[in-house]
Image (spheres, rainbow, N blue to C red):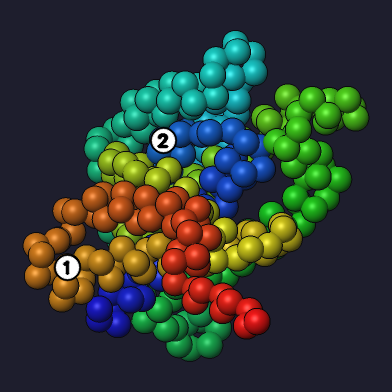
Amino acid sequence: MSLFAFIGSIEIGLIYALIALGVFLSFRVLDFPDLTVDGSYPLGAATAAAGIVAGLDPFSATALAIIAGGLAGAMTAWLNIRFRILQLLASILTMTALYSINLRIMGKPNVPLLNQETLVTWTRDHLTAIFGWAPPSYQLKVWMLGVIVLIVWALLSWFLNSEFGLAMRATGANPRMARAQGVSTQMHNYVGMAISNALVALAGALFAQTSGFADITLGTGTIVGGLAAVILGETLFRTRSIAWLLIACIVGAILYRLAIALALNSEWSRSIGLNSSDQNLVTSVLVGLALILPSQFPRLRAIFSPAPKSASK
């Protein structure tokens, strides 16, 4: 794998880290199986791209994308709480509706951001104005995304360890006990789902600005990638600390994207005919391994560990 492909994988991995944090919040904290992310990811990209093309500055366009993602998550929670629709079905309904909404927002299936001011160009221009120099674009994107992910990690760690965040974690762990302690589980589900999809929409907005376009098909497989990052991170980091669990999601997202890049760009993969169109196949295999291997560790240890020596008489 070339250096350029490696840095590109880190860049996409940092974007997927935000998706993984959102998926962690819905799946692990709230215990809410949420497929809305397949719609809120392109929603963030579409909203940011349409806003920038319409003349908004990149910060306002990104903020608008975050708000749109939050509303999508709140809509899924509303369908589940208000009308007793199953969590999975409620998220599928919202995801399906978002496909048409995203088309409405963009006005066409693809919106390019060529010659438009984005967070990348804004950062480059200000670094040049202050220091008289800015790193190459492919390096600048990684540094910018790294700083954003670090800020989101710090804010989310603080939030989940606050009184409100602890009540939200209790809502997901044992809603009946949480209600008995006076916790408004409905409100915490609304807020948690809104934050989860707002993070995913932020990832979409950043993808559009770093890649230079927004496309209606961006959301395909987003939930699989986010879930794979969470599972991979939890497999590598055996911890109960919420801060380290969030770091695990970030590391898992980066390793997940590196694994896909290695699988598609290695000599072995080319020898068996794999190419970029097989990304979904490679993703499914990696997710399957991430789900299967942790449960097989005890059996593998029993197979490969040496048998205990019998006691001599």
- Residue named by callout 2: 39
Specify few, some or many for label 2: CA neighbours under 10 Å numbering under 14, 14-19, or 20 or more: many
Q: Residue at x 38, y 55 (%)?
A: 289
Q: Is residue 235 left or right of residue 278?
A: right
Of the pair 2 and 216, the residue shown nearer to us: 2
Identify the element where label 2 is drawn.
helix
Residue 268 against residue 292 in the figure, above or below? below
Q: CA distance from mark 1 to mark 2?
A: 31 Å
Give the residue type that dot 1 points to: Ser
- Residue named by callout 1: 269
Task: Give the x, y percent position of residue 283.
Answer: 31, 53
Specify few, some or many for label 1: CA neighbours under 10 Å numbering under 14, 14-19, or 20 or more: few
Q: Quadrant of the C terminus?
A: bottom right
Of the pair 194 and 126, the residue shown nearer to us: 194
Q: Is residue 215 left or right of residue 297?
A: left
Task: Give the x, y percent position of residue 9.
Answer: 35, 69
